[in-house]
Image (cartoon, helix red, strand yellow):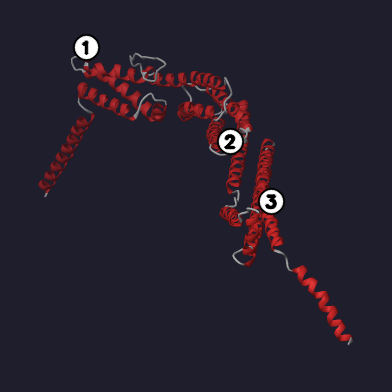
Amino acid sequence: MKNKIYLVVFFYLLIPYCVLSQKSDAELFYDFKNELKHIQDNYKNYKNSKLSNENKIKNEFDNYLNLIYEDYTNSQSTGLTNLIPEIKNSFNNFSQNNENNKQLFLSKINNFLEKWKEGNNLNIINKVAKDYDFDVSLQIDNINTIKNEIESEKIDNYERIVQFLEIIIQDKNEILKLKNQIVELENKIKSKIQQNITNSNILKDVLSENNLRKELIFKLISTIVNEHKIITSSDYAEKVKPSPFSSDLYILLNNFMEDYINISRNLSIETDPNILTTCLNAYNDVISKLDSLFLLMETSNVLKKGEKEDLITKSQLWKNQIIPVFDNVLMSEFTSRNIPILFFKTNNTEWFYKTLTEFINPYLNPSDEVNTDKSKSDEIRQKFEDAWNSIKEKWSQALISSKYLDKNKIIEIDNKLETWQSITGGSYKSSTIIIIIIVLIGISLAIYILLKFKRKET
């Protein structure tokens, strides 16, 4: 009897539980709406989180740029290099967090769509929804649209930012290295100039080091200009500051020219041709590149107002110091041989070519009065040819680099001298051939007489 009572009580208690666990149609409908709102709220949070992360990334980018310039300004190349793995790790974490957030949100969407896919639950909430003029299918379509949008999102790995910062760091390291090398050379050169610049061995060392210094300055300018191009073509142009050392370029170039001016003050016509040629080549190289360098430096905001004009003035001082020495060396080749030549000296480099041709051309006309006395004309020609050969041997490279002559004009002068020689006494080649023939005839005749004499003895 007791067992029956227990069973009745058990079923009595079970019935309301089953009724309570069985949700009504309205409750299912409100569950759907609540979960729908939860997904929609999650979507807003996901978007806000992405925006927040982008702001964090921008701040992180700014922080790293400040660190780069702090180490750069303090000449800490080691600190710059150590930043690279830290930068990579930081932006990799940002990327990984974005990917995790994406997958978490997609998981919630998929759970929602799986629960409310075609079936009894969907049919039930559709019936209730009609009473509230609520379009369930439209809401599910909207969630599917959100899902497709999130799935199609490509998570940025921030590789472009990392690469950009790496390039900036590498450029800064290169600029630091070049600047340090230039300053070190500059100090060594100034010390040697103060010691004894008249010593040819010291002077050769100074010129060699100064040539390296010149190439390093050009390389430094090129590096800063290229960095500027990279920055201005990037998305971060407004954020990146100009190189702190860019303003030093004016000082480095100015000091370089100043040292060469001091060196040139010790040059004379007795100077070793190799030394003078090296000085001339340095001057010509810098002058030939100044215009293009100025253009690059101005577009890269490297030169301040007035600095270009100062450097042009300095280059003119350099020219006034070294070019007259070279001109005097060339003229001395003729005056030391007492050649009655008129120098058409002007500031134009064409003066030397004009001087040579104006002197030679009258001698190329057989009827000209200068050829009245052929022996005198030939004597002048020989002296002139000696001077010309000496100039070619010592100064060909300097003549070409200084744009006094080019290879074609040198050949032209050689041809004119051959013509002059043929007028005064036959060409050098033909007279040489005649001498050789005479010598050969003499040898042959001697051998013939010797053989004939021996036959008589036998």
Using the numbered discs, state the Cα–Cα distance from disc 1 to disc 2 in whole angstroms: 74 Å
Mark 1 Cα-neighbour bin, 10 Å: few <14, some 14–19, many ≥20: few
Nearer the observer, 126 or 180: 126
Q: Measured from the top left, where is residue 292 in percent x and y?
A: 47, 28
The three-letter code of the residue at mark 2 reads Ala
Nearer the observer, 84 or 318: 84
Of the image marks 1 and 2, the number of the one nearer the N terminus: 2
The three-letter code of the residue at mark 3 reads Asp
Q: Nearer the viewer, mark 2 or mark 3?
A: 3
Using the numbered discs, state the Cα–Cα distance from disc 3 to disc 1 in whole angstroms: 109 Å
SS for dot 1: helix
Query: Of the numbered discs in the image, which one, if any, rests on residue 41?
Result: 3
Q: Which residue is mark 1?
A: 369
Using the numbered discs, state the Cα–Cα distance from disc 2 to disc 3 in whole angstroms: 37 Å
The answer to whether 341 appears left or right of 431 in the picture is right
Marks 3 and 1 in Cβ contact (< 8 Å): no
Query: Of the numbered discs in the image, which one, if any, rests on residue 402?
Result: none
The answer to whether 383 appears left or right of 365 in the picture is right
Marks 2 and 3 in Cβ contact (< 8 Å): no
Q: Nearer the viewer, mark 1 or mark 2?
A: 2
Residue at position x 34%, y 21% from top?
353
Of the image marks 2 and 3, the number of the one nearer the N terminus: 3
Q: Measured from the top left, where is residue 200 in percent x and y?
A: 53, 29
Which corner quadrant holds the N terminus? bottom right
Task: Determine the residue located farthest toward the top in the rendered image.
Answer: 369
SS for dot 3: helix
Marks 1 and 2 in Cβ contact (< 8 Å): no
Q: Quadrant of residue 148?
A: bottom right
Mark 3 Cα-neighbour bin, 10 Å: few <14, some 14–19, many ≥20: few
Query: Of the numbered discs in the image, which one, if any, rests on residue 237?
Result: 2
